[in-house]
Amino acid sequence: MMLRIRDATTVERPMLEALQRRSSDIWPEYRQLLATHPDAIELPQAFVDNRWVRVAVEAGDEPVGFSVLIPGDDGVHELDGLFVDPVHMRRGVGRGLVEDALALAAESGASCLEVTAGPARRFYEGVGFRKIGDAQTRFGPAVRLQLALQSINQIPQHEGEAMHAVVVNLTINEPDADLRALRDRVVPLVSRAPGFVTGYWTRRGNAGLSMIVFDSEHAADAAAEQLRSTTPDAVATLENMDVREVVAHA
């Protein structure tokens, strides 16, 4: 996909708001809240007029994602929103929008970008943002993240890297509870992680073995850290977790 990023136009506002809704609906924890409070999705005309809204387009000038970058007086630019159409996720659109925001912020003399993130926290951390504090949004707790301005080529780049797998061995203490936790929490969480490719969870008796593949070692390492904190000790005991390079697949 040949990606191009440009300023948004006024006529695109309804289209971009619809894209934001589709992008936000991938998070189960937001889906019902947005259905109840549709007013939460609004792209103010002033943002477009001020050229704060940047649109990622592919062939045919069709928007596939957009960002909102609000300049601050103290050298801190706020990444007020970044949304990618679900059918175009994991194809570099989000990374491209972050790189575009960095370039614009650097041109205006900013020292860093900051963002408030909920479920998308892992994406931002994957492109170099670091937590600086906690936050509260209309829909619940979030974190504040910051990315100091740097050369764009210093942002972690994973394209062309070998895929890596997180291999997990565990002892299942409560089979029924383990299966519920796997289906309700672990699989949805992992499948939304940046760089996720595919995953398999197996068991024989009380022994569980899973292999979850990511598009880079960086993404696999980040997912492994997340998995360590989400394995419920009461229903399963983590025996071993390892990140390995995928050297062949069929």
Image: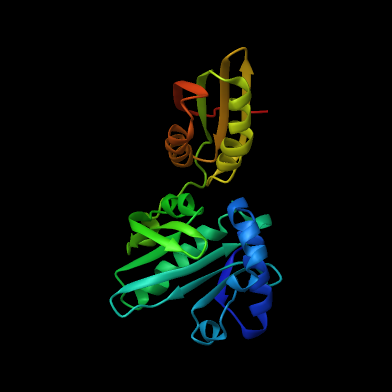
In the image, residue 87 sits, relative to residue 210, either above or below, namely below
In the image, residue 42 sits, relative to residue 163, either above or below, namely below
- Image spot of residue 87 (x, y percent): 68, 56
- How many numbered marks are there? 0
Nearer to us in this view, 122 or 198 = 122
Nearer to us in this view, 103 or 133 = 133
Quarter of the image containing the N terminus?
Answer: bottom right
Place residue 32 in its image quadrant: bottom right
On screen, residue 246 versus residue 218, left or right, reads: right
- Image spot of residue 7 (x, y percent): 55, 79
**Residue at 53% across, 74% down:** 54
- Image spot of residue 82 (x, y percent): 52, 65
On screen, residue 60 versus residue 75, left or right, reads: right
Place residue 206 in its image quadrant: top right
Nearer to us in this view, 42 or 49 = 42
Quarter of the image containing the C terminus?
Answer: top right
- Is residue 1 in view from this perspective? no
